[in-house]
Every structure is written in structure tokens, then in C-alpha cells.
Amino acid sequence: MKPSPIEARLIAAFEQFEIIDAHEHLPPEKVRVEMRVDALTLFSHYTRVDLLAAGLSQQDYERSQNPDLPLDLRWRIVSPYIPHIRYGSYARPAFIAAKTFYGHDDINDATYQSLSAAMQAANTPGIYKRILRDKCRIRTALTQANRTDYDLDLLIPLMPMDTYTNLNSWDAALRLSAALQMKAACLDDWLAVMHAGLAKWKNEGVVGLKMTSRALAAPKRAEAVSLFDRLRNGADTSLSTPNPLYEFLLDKMLDFVAAEDMVVAVHAGMWGDFRQIDAQHIIPIVQRHPKTRFDLYHMGMPQVRETAIIAKNWSNVWLNLCWTHIISQKQTCAALDEYLDLVPVNKILAFGGDYGKPVEKVYGHLVMAREDIARVLANRIADGLMTEDEAIAIARRWFWDNPRQLYRLPGH
């Protein structure tokens, strides 16, 4: 991106912000430094989607990410597809990371070996601080890897809603209740287990639960009791999801989350048959739970307008731009410009890298996020709708104040 003079000034201002990274999948640092990393690591995670769309087979993708195979072989598998994806938003953070952290202007036949050596040499304790804190100026990142053993100063976890609500076998009920030194002989006992599990997570630093927007029926206690009892007495050995028990437990957990003053993060839009996870499915749930705070992810892409109207109409819904900047910068900018028309500025969260293993790509994603927000706000300045100082204040709210306030982060 070649920024205009106004955009360049805004980006320079944004680079001075401390920020809250509002969504990652990062494991503890010790997990990352125990991995063998190389140039192909930069083509893992979301870049996989574009590689497959370009024609790489799932089997070959998995081979390319297997460090037990020779690097030369793995590079030969992937390299024919890189020219097809290198101009897309998913690939750009890989090239930014290669240049910023490892001094390589490109990832190609001539550089992949030296880049791989540089990456492995840098894969040492402190890499999270060097990338996230020092380079990105991330004060706190909210992360989801189904675990709570984090340095809670930098990484703060969210946990999966389905751990307790998607009760699809009696063995799972026994295991989860025993872990809390509890028993679940009836549905009300299981509700107590759920609330106790949530409270335990909160004591371990968890600030929210993650769910997916999907079409669900209104909860019916009688049907939930029947299914719970069928699991308990062995009449059913497993349940498909969704089902009346799941719908009832989810509804109750949303009340427990509100009681614990935590947040419900909602995946919506992208992945597979995105019609099944449309953000609009969350509307009846939001209506039934006005005291629960919902963080609606990914602009609901591609249904970005419908997602905006949800946040406009209900005060307990926020809009999180995590992942969006690397899905499409153009779509993100167009949608964010409309969001300024539609949604109060205290309802928007600017950034979440949404990465796991390739932590280096968080920085590239952040570069793109700053560009997108600068472009949208610069246009508003040029149209006489706000001043530069006002634009900087709005961006600071999006990068820092809003996620900090929504999640009740330490120091708020």
C-alpha cells in the first residue's frame, strides 16, 4: 500500500499506540519454541486456504508442514503455488514477516533455506515478547487454544463454550464433573457443574467463552431433561449437535457468563458453508440475553452489512475486526466505512491477528490493520467529517479502549 500524506501521518500515530490484540490462537511460548520452524511455517494457518484453493491437495499441504520430511522436498511441493497466492491478503503477512524479522525481501527458491535457518535460530525463549510486545506494541493478546497456562500479563485466555454445553456422551459428563470433584445425577446437577467450571476458568484468568453463530431452536427444559437422562441411563450413547440438550445448556451458560461479568465471543461468517454460521443466527440469542456481552467476530464476512445492523440494534453486541484485514483489505475498508455511518465508535474493536503457530505473521496483519483504518479515517478527514486529532482518538479507542473496556482487562 502506498499511503497518502494523511494516511501516512495516521499510520505513524497508530504505531505509537499500545494495543489490545483482541483475538489469537497462540499457545504458550514454550510450545512455540519447542517446534521446528522454517519458511513453510509462514505458509501455514490461513495461507493454507489459498494454497488449497489454488490447487494444492490437502495431503500435500500436510506433507509440506511435516518437519520430519526434508525441507527441499517440502519446498518443491508448495513453491509452484506461491505465485498464485502471493498477491492475496492471506499471503502478505508472510512476506512482511520474512523481511521485518529475518531480512529477506522475498520467499523464493534462492531464499527459503537461509530464511528457514534464520527462523529456527530466532525460535528461542523471548520470541513472543520480541514480536508481540516490542515490535507490535501489544500490551495484551486474548488467545484461544483451549488451555489456561499462560503468562497472564501478555496472553489472556478465552475458552470454548462447547466444553460444557456440547454434552454428547455420558463419559464426557463423568470426566468433566470429576475434574471439579462434583457429581451430575440430574440436569440441575450438570448446571451446577457448568457454573463451577466457568468460575474455575475465571479464577485462572479466563475473560470469556467462544461460541459459533448457528441456527438454534429456543430452549425447552423438558426436552433437555429427557436427553440428559437418556445419556445418563445409556439409552443414548452419543448426540449429534445441535440438539435440545445443547440448546438448553447453551442458553443457561450465557446467563452464567453474564453473572460472572465475562464476554461471549461469537464466530460468524467465514469457513466452509458460511450460510450455516451467519451472524444473523445470533439475533434471538442476543434478544434473550440482554445482560450478556457479545463480541461478534470477523465482521460476519461476507455478510458485513447484516452484522453491522445487529450491533446497531442491540447495545450488548460489539464488532470485532479480528481476521478481517487478512481476509480482504478492500472488503474490510468498505465495511468499516459503512460501520462509521451505522455503529457508535465505542462498539468496534480494531484488531485480532487470529494466528497460532506463525506468531511472526501477527505483525504483518497489524501492519495491514493500521493501513485499513488509516485509509478509512483519512477519507473521512478529506470529506471534512472529522479532524486528524479526532481520527487518531477514534483509532485509539478501537485499538485500546474498546477491547479493554469490553473484556474488563486488568488496569481498566
Image (spheres, rainbow, N blue to C red):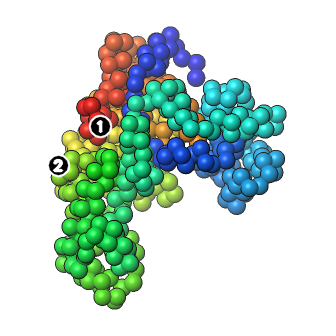
Quarter occupied by the N terminus: top right
Please tell me whether mark 1 sits on a helix, a strand or a loop: loop
Front residue of 80/15: it is 15
| x 20%, y 41%: residue | 315
Sort mark 1 into few (<14), some (14-19) or many (20+) by Cα contacts within 10 Å: some
Give the residue type at disc 1. Answer: Leu
Position of 22 compared to 122: left or right?
left
Q: Secondary structure at mark 2?
A: loop
* Cα gap from disc 2 to disc 1, whole angstroms: 18 Å
Q: Amino acid at mark 2?
A: Lys
**What residue is at 34 percent from the left and 89 percent from the top?**
235
**Would you name the residue on which mark 1 appears?**
409
- 294 or 182: nearer the viewer: 182
Look at mark 2 in the image and give the residue it sits on. Answer: 291
* Label 2 with label 1: CB-CB less than 8 Å: no
Residue 295 versus residue 285 in the image, above or below = above
Up/down of 343 relative to 240, above or below: above
Q: Residue at x 40, y 13 (%)?
A: 382
Question: Does residue 95 show up?
Answer: no
- Left or right? Give the position of 197 relative to 303: left
Q: Position of residue 341 (x, y in %)?
A: 31, 29
Residue mark closest to the camera, 2 vs 1: 1
Q: Earlier in the sequence, mark 2 or mark 1?
A: 2
Give the x, y percent position of residue 197. 28, 61
At a point 48% along the width and 38% down the height, the residue shown is 353
Residue 109: give x, y in percent of width and height. 81, 37
359 or 130, which lies in front? 130
For mark 2, does the 10 Å Cα neighbourhood hold few (<14), some (14 to 19), or many (20 or more) residues?
some
